[in-house]
Amino acid sequence: FDILEDDFEETENNSLLFGSHSEMHGGVVEVMSIDDDAVNQLVIEGLLVPHGYVVTPAMSGEEALKLLSSRDYLPDVILMDCEMPQCSGYEVCSALRRLYPETLPVILISADADED
């Protein structure tokens, strides 16, 4: 997971260096969806896009972190799967909290319906 953070120059508070998507794009809210399941990505898009949200999909935590590092703004909120194969949503969330500690809301979701 260290590879993901090597691409970032950490400051004491990276989140203050960036505005949100809605601040930079006339109030249009961006939801970044981080999920390795393409069907789940389609469901999120199908639910949110008709209501005027911009949905930016990322198929892994690594892809999401690379995308965030390439932009000068943050999404308004991140929806992220807890259970991904290479690094869990919890690991990605930890990296996001270190990089953007102040203002980036992250919602962890899971489709695990284990009924123990």
Image (spheres, grey):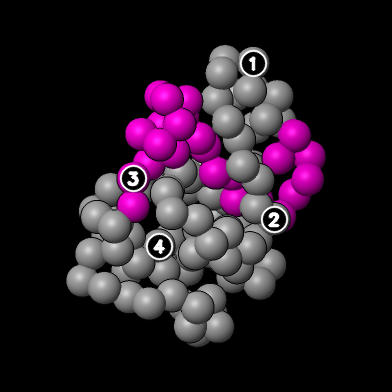
Residue hosting label 3 = 19
Residue depth check, mark 2 versus mark 3: number of the one nearer the observer: 3
Residue hosting label 4 = 96
**Callout 3 crowding tier (Cα within 10 Å): few <14, some 14–19, many ≥20:** some
**Callout 2 crowding tier (Cα within 10 Å): few <14, some 14–19, many ≥20:** some
Going from N to C along the chain, the mark reached first, 1 or 3, is 3
**Callout 4 crowding tier (Cα within 10 Å): few <14, some 14–19, many ≥20:** many
Viewer-nearest residue: 29 or 94? 29
Q: Are marks 2 and 3 in contact (CB under 8 Å)?
A: no
Determine the CA span between mark 3 and mark 4: 15 Å
Determine the CA span between mark 4 and mark 2: 16 Å
Q: Amino acid at mark 4?
A: Leu
Going from N to C along the chain, the mark reached first, 2 or 3, is 3
Which residue reaches farthest right?
Answer: 39
Q: Residue at coordinates 70% horizontally, 24% vertically from top-left? A: 46
Which residue reaches farthest left?
Answer: 12
Query: Where, by quadrant of the figure, is residue 63 drawn?
Result: bottom right
Residue hosting label 2 = 59
Going from N to C along the chain, the mark reached first, 4 or 2, is 2
Determine the CA span between mark 2 and mark 1: 22 Å
Residue depth check, mark 3 versus mark 4: number of the one nearer the observer: 3
Query: Where, by quadrant of the figure, is residue 3 drawn?
Result: bottom right
Determine the CA span between mark 4 and mark 1: 28 Å
Relative to 84, residue 77 above or below: above
